[in-house]
Image: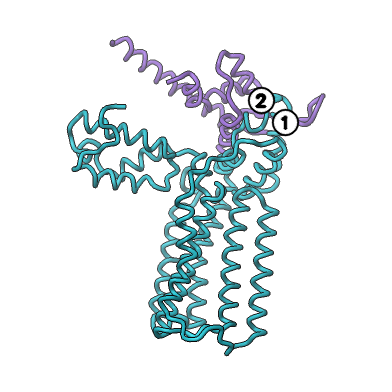
Amino acid sequence: MSIAAWQRASLPMLVLSVLSVAPRHGYGISQALVSAGLQPIKGAQLYPALVRLEDEGAIVAQWEQSESGPARKVYELTAVGHAQRADLLEQWRAFITAAEAVGRAK
Amino acid sequence: MTVGANVWPVGDQEWVARYRTSMTDRNVSALALDERESELAGTVHEMKVPAAELFGDAEELACEDAAELATVEEEVRTSLAGGLQPALKEVGGMLMGVGIVTSLILIIRSGWSVDIDTALVLIGASVLVAFVGWVIARVLFASGRSAAAVGAGVGAGVVAVAGIASAANVGAGHIAASAVPLPLLVAGLLSPGTATLVIADRMPRQELRENWDDSQWLRRFRGGLRARLVPAVTARGHVAEIEQTLAAGGMSAYSEFGHPLTLAHEVARADKSARRRLWAVSTSAAVGAPLCLAVLVVANQSWGMLTIPVVVAFFLMAAGAFVVGWGRRPWTTQR
């Protein structure tokens, strides 16, 4: 499994983690992931993930007037999103611990 | 790929046939299906155990595989929005349906030969134009071309009304052809649908369009959202956001977001109000269409002594559609 595939599978957790630091617009989320050392994520994957998270109530979006240029849609984490992120991180850590244990057993 | 991949042992032919049947219309690409079958056949050869014993029920495995292998791209490619081939299949199916129903009515009501009334031919042709116009309008709407869809629908409606007006003008009793043999007439009624379906079946597999400039892409994306019943305000918001991303990143819409209708389908699927609207419209249509047909059959007594059984069949279809629709109501089922 490639890093890109891991990234796709864990995209909701990554997006929620980026937004837990500060509100961002869609392109900003993508840039934050790249800055953290991950591979660039296409809008075709990121955008539906954002719409799903918004539909689930994990994030909210609002249009903000930028100083230079058109208005931007900025996403922010909600209380539901914080809880969802904590839950996903817990599952991720449990998976990593188990996977490492399997690796050590070999 | 292992030796003997995709070559199934004779004893497994029935199992694999059921697997293939269960995988049809599940939005799994031919390539993915072929690879999965190679994998399964390879395992069967390696283990030397019958497929049913190794993998269990073919339909259950197909359900699990489809959940994993289905893609939105394939869903769009095979949907009405997927180009000429699905459109021709839809038109062919509709022509066959009209042809079969008309043939059955003629067989029930006539002898071995029929006098063809000019007014009835005009009415029949008008109904056909209305049906074909409806299918073309649906194809255009599903492809995100709302204005063209309205144009096609209105155009077909005008032609159909003109045809019916001409029929009323001609009046009954004008015979266009006398004593036409029924088998010849039935063959004539069924051949357009058969020919269309054969042509659609023999067409090469169509791929989704890849060349888009950004303005075309955005227009089609918005049309795709509206075709999936995303509210207008929400659709405008999505388009504005994509425009904002394109301006910030300097990339092309297709290279960043893929096919506009694929993204529109994914976004609409994640939108609560679009899901509810789509469910309400599709369930109402599935329940309402057989009920309307039942009313028409009763009003015209077109099926003679078979009127009651035909009406009961339509009521059962409507009841079945309601039960299925209720089972899929979006406020209790997950995406």
Residue appearing at x 56%, y 52% in the figure: B278
Give the chain letter at badge 1. B
Residue appearing at x 69%, y 24% in the figure: B249
Residue appearing at x 43%, y 23% in the figure: A91
Q: Are marks 1 and 2 on the same chain?
A: no
Question: What residue would you read off at disc 2?
Answer: A27
In this view, A104 is above or below B80: above
Which residue of the protein is positioned furthest toward the bottom in this rendering?
Answer: B173
The picture quadrant where one finds residue B27 is top left
Task: Determine the colour of chain A.
Answer: purple
Query: Residue B305 placed where, x, y %?
Result: 39, 84
Q: Secondary structure at mark 1?
A: helix
Q: Nearer the viewer, residue B231 or B289?
A: B289
Query: Residue A22 placed where, x, y %?
Result: 65, 21
The picture quadrant where one finds residue B250 is top right
* Mark 1 Cα-neighbour bin, 10 Å: few <14, some 14–19, many ≥20: many
What amino acid type should be assigned to the residue bearing mark 2?
Tyr
Q: Which chain is cyan?
A: B
Q: Secondary structure at mark 2?
A: helix
Question: What residue would you read off at disc 1?
Answer: B244
1 and 2 marks in contact (CB < 8 Å): yes
Residue appearing at x 29%, y 46% in the figure: B17
In this view, B97 is above or below B272: below
Image quarter in which the N terminus of chain B is found: top left
Asked if residue B204 lies left or right of residue B171, the reply is left
Query: Residue B115 placed where, x, y %?
Result: 49, 85
Numbered-mark total: 2
Q: Nearer the viewer, residue A38 or B88?
A: B88
Query: Residue B317 placed where, x, y %?
Result: 42, 66
